[in-house]
């Protein structure tokens, strides 16, 4: 989805004024939006897509329900606050190893179009290519999320699952 960075930056600034902190710097950007470091010792993700925002909020709700901030030695951000109007999510900053960006995750089941066995095989091949000797650790992390918490994480790449 195409978005205009100035609009997301404006939303981040509006949110920061409400909470009374400043935006320090941009940490990243992707398909669903932009992430900023704040003076509140947090990360602020500003979404451009309501469906992705809703998925991410739902996943953080599930993680909070189980008091999860770490799985298999991977740190997971903890939800601090959010704003449904601005589509902003404020969370703790984590250090590697970590798993971040739950906008592409699904609760309880994968959507029908992602059940395809060819798609699953392609994802496994991509993991082998992207993570090489760490593929087994990534697979164990994903299995733990799926089996124990019914969180299906689909946006698996080294930017979202980092070791160092």
Image (cartoon, rainbow, N blue to C red):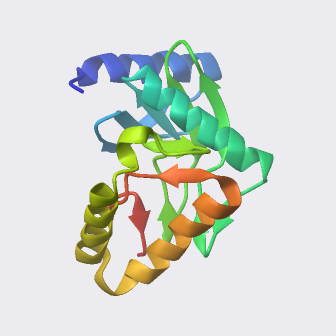
Can you tell which quarter of the image residue 82 is in? top right
* Residue at horizontal 45 percent and vertical 73 percent from the top: 138
- Counting from the top left corner in percent of width and height, residue 84 is at 57, 17
Locate the C terminus and report the quarter of the image it occupies: bottom left
Give the camera-side residue of 55 and 86. 55
Visible residue check, residue 20: no
* Residue at horizontal 66 percent and vertical 31 percent from the top: 81
Location of residue 120 with respect to 61 vertically, above or below: below
Left or right, 160 with reference to 60: left
Location of residue 81 with respect to 138 vertically, above or below: above
* Residue at horizontal 37 percent and vertical 46 percent from the top: 114
Location of residue 153 with respect to 62 vertically, above or below: below
- Counting from the top left corner in percent of width and height, residue 115 is at 40, 50
Locate the N terminus and report the quarter of the image it occupies: top left
Visible residue check, residue 157: yes
Left or right, 61 with reference to 43: right
Give the camera-side residue of 146 and 10. 146
- Counting from the top left corner in percent of width and height, residue 35 is at 40, 39
């Amino acid at each position: 989805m195409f978005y205009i960075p100035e609009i997301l930056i404006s939303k981040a600034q509006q949110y920061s004024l409400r909470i009374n902190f400043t935006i320090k710097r941009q940490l990243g950007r992707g398909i669903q939006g932009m992430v900023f470091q704040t003076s509140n010792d947090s990360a602020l993700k500003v979404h451009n897509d309501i469906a992705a925002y809703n998925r991410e909020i739902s996943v953080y709700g599930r993680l909070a329900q189980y008091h999860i901030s770490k799985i298999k030695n991977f740190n997971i951000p903890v939800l601090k606050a959010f704003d449904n109007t601005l589509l902003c999510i404020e969370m703790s900053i984590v250090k590697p190893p970590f798993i971040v960006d739950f906008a592409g995750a699904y609760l309880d089941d994968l959507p029908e179009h992602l059940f395809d066995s060819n798609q699953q095989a392609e994802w496994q091949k991509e993991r082998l290519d992207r993570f090489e000797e760490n593929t087994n650790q990534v697979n164990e992390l994903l299995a733990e999320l799926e089996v124990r918490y019914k969180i299906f994480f689909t946006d698996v790449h080294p930017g979202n699952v980092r070791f160092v």
